[in-house]
Structure formats: structure tokens, C-alpha cells
Amino acid sequence: MRPQAEVMADLESYAQLLEKWQAVQNLVSRETLSEVWTRHFADSLQVLKLVRESDQAFLDLGSGGGFPALPLAIALKGSKRHFTLVEPNGRKVSFLRTVARDLGLLVNVEGRRSDQIDSRETITPDVITSRALASMPRLCSWMAPFFGQQTRALLHKGREHVEELAESGALWHHDVLITPSDTDDNGVLIELTNLSLKNR
């Protein structure tokens, strides 16, 4: 793990870029911009407790303003771990690439939707992340093409996670571990493995 002072310095640079770009591009909700350290950085970084030493390739779907992938890439900088961020919005892509370049992160940004990416041409990720993107059934359909035997999804979810898991469980096989969120009393981190479509 990097020295905390270095991580904090890079997060501060990220926060400054976020505030600058927020003026012209809605990267996070206005109400949460003043709470970026707790609502976005700390919320993203809690995923670290579920990251394994063997996790090298990360795929983040619907990256938006970069959460949780960019704080994770900052914390893990220098470890050779590689992050692919998928975001179809052109201005957000420019922002993500600017942060990655300015902070020297091992990050590649795909400026298209996940269903426009041929999973046969990408490295099978060890970890798929996503935060505030879509319901579990839809997320499962987007993640499935990229899932390998060892792939795990680490997903931020809110109070509706029980209902969403029931809905996705009607369509998909998946094993699930739930960890309470450190930053949201109603939130959880879902660790999802063995994803496959049920025969209908």
C-alpha cells in the first residue's frame, strides 16, 4: 500500500479537478460536491477491504465522475494493477482521461457503452466494479459477457438491494456475499461470483 500522504495528495488533486470540471459537466450531484471526501472518496475506498492480492485487472462500468475506480487506482498506484473504465459520455471521458494522465494512473478509458465492447478482445477482469449505475438484473446482463471463472463483482448498492437481488436471482445464477457499507447506513457492498444466465 502507498504511503497515506501520497494517496491524500493525489485525492486532493482529484478533488480540485472534479470541482473545476463540475462547472461545465455534471460529474456528481451538486449536493454532494461539498462532501466529496465522505460521499465519494471514502465510499469508493471501502472496496479496498475486499480486494485480494491476486486481483490485477479491474473493469469499472458506468464510471461517470470516476467512482469507485479512480480512488481505487490512486490507492493502488504503483502496484501494477490496471483499471479499464467504461463511460459513453464524451465529456466525462475527457475528464477521466485528464485525471488519469495528471495523476499518472494505470487507467484506460473506453468511451463507449459496455455492450459496444467485444469481451473477446479484452482481458478477463479479476474484479468488476460499479456504483449507482443500474438495477441488479440490468447490471448482471451488462457484466456477464466479461465474467470469467475467477471474476468477482464488487458493487455498491443501496436500501433496495434485497429486492434487486431477488429480481436478478429469478434470471441469473450468482453467489452473493453482502458487507454493510462503512459510509451509508442503508448501503451495502455486494460481492458477486459465479454469474451465469439461467436456462428458461
Image: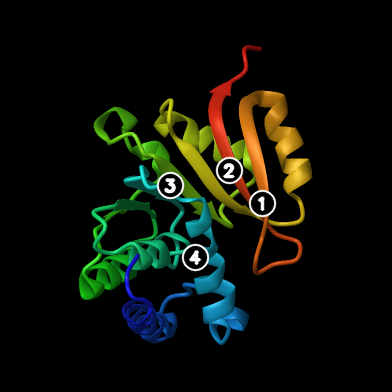
Which of the image's four quarters has the C terminus?
A: top right
Image height check: is 199 above or below 52? above
Q: Quadrant of residue 114?
A: top left
Q: Is residue 198 left or right of residue 77?
A: right
**Residue 24: percent from left, percent from top:** 40, 81
Mark 1 or mark 3: which is in front?
3
Q: Quadrant of the N terminus?
A: bottom left
Q: Amino acid at mark 2?
A: Glu
Mark sitting earlier along the chain (3/4): 4
Q: Is residue 95 above or below residue 118?
A: below
Q: Which residue is mark 4?
A: 45
Give the amino acid type for the residue marked by disc 3 in the picture: Arg
Which one is earlier in the sequence, the residue at label 2 or at label 3?
3
| C-alpha span from label 3 to label 4 | 14 Å
Q: Which residue is mark 1?
A: 179
Q: Which residue is mark 3?
A: 52
| x and y, in percent, of residue 132 in the image | 59, 57
Q: Is residue 139 left or right of residue 5?
A: right
Q: Are marks 2 and 1 in contact (CB under 8 Å)?
A: yes
**SS class, disc 2:** strand
Q: CA distance from mark 2 to mark 1?
A: 8 Å
Front tag of 2 and 3? 3
Give residue 191's mark.
Answer: 2
Q: Earlier in the sequence, mark 1 or mark 3?
A: 3
User: Could you tell me the amino acid type at mark 1?
Assistant: Thr
Decide which of tag 2 and tag 1 comes sooner along the chain.
1
